[in-house]
Image (spheres, coloured by chain):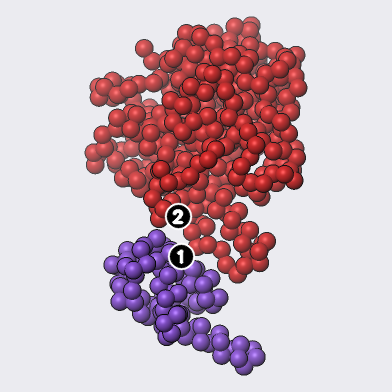
């Protein structure tokens, strides 16, 4: 995962939760950040907007941590780039 | 009691404006209406959530739900409610709303319909739901008793307050917070009102010969209801007594009101209150300022009160706070209670010249000192659903 992607990812979380950016890291737990189920759907929406991706429900349900979520986003971004490169 | 509307951010400001006969109608600022057939509305001008809600909390509340919470906070503080676990369990919250969170819905639909975006904000549903006001009040105050929302268009808050009143009177609950809230200034909704051709291109002049229609308003009002003995026992500040509630359905036309239906609701409220028609000294009219409502309401009042119709004062405060739809009856119930309490009847503002079809004493333009003991507050909804509240001065 690139640094730039990580920063954008963390910005999204901080913006949705209205938290100071420096308090949000890949090692934060959902509990630390006070992320509940309603926040989660808003974060998924904001990530889809930020990265122009579509996050499948099944993939979203499996996410256990910030790091999982960031990696899931990175995969979807990479898949999109690969699709674009192969002319899909 | 608590209120927020075009006339003020609390009941004190609301009362001052009503007594001064000052209208809150002005060019609409939330939506660009330059291409509309109307330009004016009764908004809570310059409103921002910041003094009332933290940013993250406000994310979850459409404007109409914010108004509901703001009015409920004032009402509970004013009533000096001391929450205990037992009281929280035996308090009801009943709110009225015609439209729910229109701003949230409009913004979401704009995103997909107009901008062609792929997705709508995930809080659109919980922001839009009509019961959001009741839910947020219950969460903030920790009230765990019955809580629900009534939606009967322009009579929503009348039905809500009436239901809550009956629940308190029957002993089903010990206390209720009841009222209504609305925030209808969204582009799509204003377009829909424009198409109805009932909104005035200038201002709202109820009962005037040259009235040209209604003016939309927004805001909320909430009342704390409890048995009189309970309020006395705890030394609460008592603003007035709610003594009766009547409702009816026209069962005739979707938007053309019926004098019979309105008259039946008025009679039902009088019967419920054990009041004789001759006792009534003031009616806060539905008084929308449309061609259809005002003569129909006049005919209904004449049918119920006969010769006494010429001895009672009737005014429409919608001339000042606009037609706040699902919040209207709550704002008007508060206005009526204050009129009885303070001995000042609010006027029908913007009045120009009498209409022979609306030949009542409409308290034109200037508030009037009058000691009145009994009053009614009328609300007649599109769809022919009517709600009338009966109030008595507390002494």
Q: Give the percent coordinates (x, y) of residue B155.
A: 57, 33
The residue tagged 2 is B59
Q: Residues within 10 Å of mark 1 (few under 14, many from 20)?
A: some
In the orientation shown, which residue stands out farthest toward the bottom? A86
Q: Quadrant of the N terminus of chain B?
A: top left
Percent position of residue B357, x then y: 74, 16
Q: Which residue lies under the disc numbered 1?
A: A42
Q: Is residue B213 above or below residue B273?
A: below
Q: Quadrant of residue A65?
A: bottom left
Q: Is residue B269 above or below residue B27?
A: above
Pointer 1 with pointer 2, Cβ within 8 A: yes
Answer whether residue B246 is visible to the viewer in this image. Answer: no
Secondary structure of the residue carrying numbered label 1: helix
Q: Which chain is red?
A: B
- Identified at 55% across, 38% down, the residue is B45
Query: Do the dots labelled 1 and 2 sit on one chain?
Result: no
Residue A85: x %, y % from top left: 60, 91
* Closer to us: A6 or B267: A6
Above-or-below relation of B198 to B187 = above
Q: How many residues crowd mark 2 within 10 Å: few (<14), some (14–19), many (20+)?
A: some
Residue at 42% in and 70% down? A11
Reply above or below: B281 against A38: above
Question: What is the chain letter for disc 1?
Answer: A
- Shown in purple, the chain is A
- Residue at the image position 40 percent from the left and 55 percent from the top: B56
Disc 2 chain ID: B
| Residue B229 x, y percent position in the rendering | 29, 21
């Amino acid at each position: 995962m690139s640094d730039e992607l990580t920063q954008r990812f963390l910005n999204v979380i901080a913006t949705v939760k209205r938290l100071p950016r420096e308090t949000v890291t890949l090692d934060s737990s959902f509990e630390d950040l006070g992320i509940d189920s309603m926040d989660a759907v808003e974060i998924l929406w904001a990530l889809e907007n930020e990265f122009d991706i579509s996050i499948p429900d099944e993939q979203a349900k499996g996410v256990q941590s910030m790091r999982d979520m960031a990696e899931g986003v990175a995969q979807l971004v990479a898949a999109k780039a690969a699709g674009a490169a192969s002319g899909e | 009691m608590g209120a927020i509307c075009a006339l003020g951010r609390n009941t004190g400001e609301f009362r001052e404006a009503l007594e001064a006969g000052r209208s809150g109608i002005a060019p609409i600022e939330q939506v660009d209406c330059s291409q509309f057939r109307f330009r004016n509305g009764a908004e809570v001008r310059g409103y921002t959530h910041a003094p009332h809600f933290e940013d993250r909390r406000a994310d979850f509340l459409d404007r109409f739900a914010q108004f509901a919470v703001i009015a409920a906070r004032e009402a509970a503080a004013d009533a000096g409610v001391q929450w205990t676990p037992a009281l929280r369990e035996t308090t009801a919250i009943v709110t009225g709303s015609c439209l729910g969170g229109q701003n949230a819905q409009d913004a979401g639909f704009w995103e997909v319909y107009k901008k062609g975006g792929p997705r709508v904000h995930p809080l659109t549903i919980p922001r839009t739901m009509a019961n959001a006001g009741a839910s947020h009040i219950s969460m903030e105050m920790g009230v765990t008793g019955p809580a629900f929302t009534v939606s009967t268009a322009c009579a929503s808050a009348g039905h809500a307050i009436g239901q809550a009143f009956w629940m308190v009177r029957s002993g089903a609950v010990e206390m209720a917070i009841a009222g209504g809230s609305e925030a209808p200034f969204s582009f799509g909704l204003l377009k829909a009102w424009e198409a109805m051709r009932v909104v005035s291109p200038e201002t709202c002049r109820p009962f005037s010969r040259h009235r040209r229609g209604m003016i939309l308003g927004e805001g909320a009002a909430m009342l704390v209801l409890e048995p009189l003995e309970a309020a006395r026992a705890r030394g609460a500040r008592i603003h007035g007594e709610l003594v009766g509630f009547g409702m009816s359905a026209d069962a005739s036309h979707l938007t053309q009101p019926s004098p019979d239906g309105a008259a039946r609701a008025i009679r039902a409220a009088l019967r419920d209150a054990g009041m004789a028609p001759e006792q009534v000294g003031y009616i806060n009219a539905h008084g929308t300022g449309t061609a259809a409502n005002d003569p129909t309401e006049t005919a209904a009042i004449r049918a119920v009160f006969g010769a006494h119709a010429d001895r009672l004062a009737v005014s429409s405060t919608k001339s000042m706070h606009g037609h706040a739809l699902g919040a209207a009856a709550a704002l008007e119930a508060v206005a009526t209670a204050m009129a009885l309490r303070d001995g000042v009847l609010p006027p029908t503002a913007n009045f120009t010249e009498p209409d022979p079809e609306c030949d009542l004493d409409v308290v034109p333009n200037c508030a009037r000192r009058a000691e009145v003991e009994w009053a009614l507050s009328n609300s007649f909804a599109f769809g022919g659903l009517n709600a009338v509240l009966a109030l008595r001065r507390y002494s």
